Amino acid sequence: RTLLPHGLLTKKCCCIMRLIASALLVILCGPATCSAFTAQRSGNAAFVSMGTHFPRQTKATTVMQNSPSDEDITPPSRSRLEGLSREPTIAEISVMDDMITKLADAKPYELPNAVSRAVRVVSSPRFFLRIAERADMATNDIEKEKLSALAENLVSTLEAVLSTTEDRLDERAKEVESVVKAAAEPESGEFLVPLSAERVNAMQTTLRKLDPISLDEGFLSTVDAWMNKSHQDGMDGMVGILQKVLQMYAGTAIVRARSQLQANVGAAVSGQSQEQADKVIAKEEEKGLTPAAALLEKLMAMDTDLWDAELRSNITAEGGISPATLMGEVQRTIEGVVLGLENGSMAQRVQAEYLRELVSRIEAIEQTL
């Protein structure tokens, strides 16, 4: 690939930066394209469900009652999120091995918290199969006994975690429903796709009003289950709406995490209390973000369908931001935010896929320069 110099970084630096960012995202996301984030290169219609375009507004469903109820949702036979619907890659097996090793060495009272943070991965049959494979490969009896004990402890721990989180999952379902309802037309209660700018803004406002603590694995698991059910019922329009929910979640979570990371780093470096560090950060924010950081946060806050136009206007403008500079800001976000999430968690996967899509958009625009 020929990279055009932009005066800020050399061609060699651009290549290195791109390889690092791309490699990190490939490791986290795997080789396949996630159906929840399917990018379409025709016009600005991106992340549209199952590769389907909606050239004019059509009804996704008539009323909210047609969305999956608790009785309708059965354990999904095929997840709509990448990595949950295929055989694990070598990198993902490595992540599972790391989790197995940590869980095996953890004290029994530490298991509930560890399991609850990655319940979707730990509760999968493939995870238990990997424990059995590790036990078969173990060369000493102590290691075999440790892995056997881990499997037994995980079963009892999962039962306890799932029973105590049932009420919380009901709450998450209500919160997901509130965001989806915001996509419906106020007068008719119908869902028209593609969504209008007003409906997208209403969804974003509703999601951002939710308690940040509620945007957890339970929230993402609910969206995944609803997407699976909608796909099974042939409701591709509703799948597209739920994709929007995931995109909005990722953008909101990343912006909040970037802010928190900055505050934490400020406290650690200065040796001050968090309260004092927050004051220092507030003063820095008054000076303004760097152009690349400001653009990235603006992109995180907007509808992904508008990314291409926003990127072109900022990258191609005279004195605009170079692709390499923006890519560097994305890379720092991957390293500081995404890699800090629980390995194998849905939060890590969704946020990584979201940033991977942004990287591909930046690369596509750079090729046209």
Image (spheres, rainbow, N blue to C red):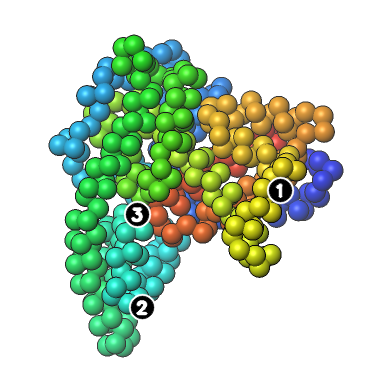
Of marks 2 and 1, which one's residue comes earlier in the chain?
A: 2
Q: How many residues crowd mark 3 within 10 Å: few (<14), some (14–19), many (20+)?
A: few
The extreme right residue here reads 7
In depth, the one of 156 and 109 nearer the eye is 109
Where the N terminus falls, by quadrant? top right
> Is 274 situated left or right of 165 in this image?
right
Name the residue located 38 percent from the left edge and 67 percent from the top edge.
99
Three-letter code, disc 3: Glu
| Mark carried by residue 87 | 3
> Is 368 situated left or right of 121 in this image?
right
Reading the image, the residue beneath label 2 is 105
Reading the image, the residue beneath label 1 is 283
> Is 238 situated left or right of 19 in this image?
left
Name the residue located 36 percent from the left edge and 50 percent from the top edge.
217
Image height check: is 319 above or below 2?
A: above
| Mark carried by residue 274 | none
Could you say where residue 81 lies in the image, as x and y percent from the top left?
A: 37, 44
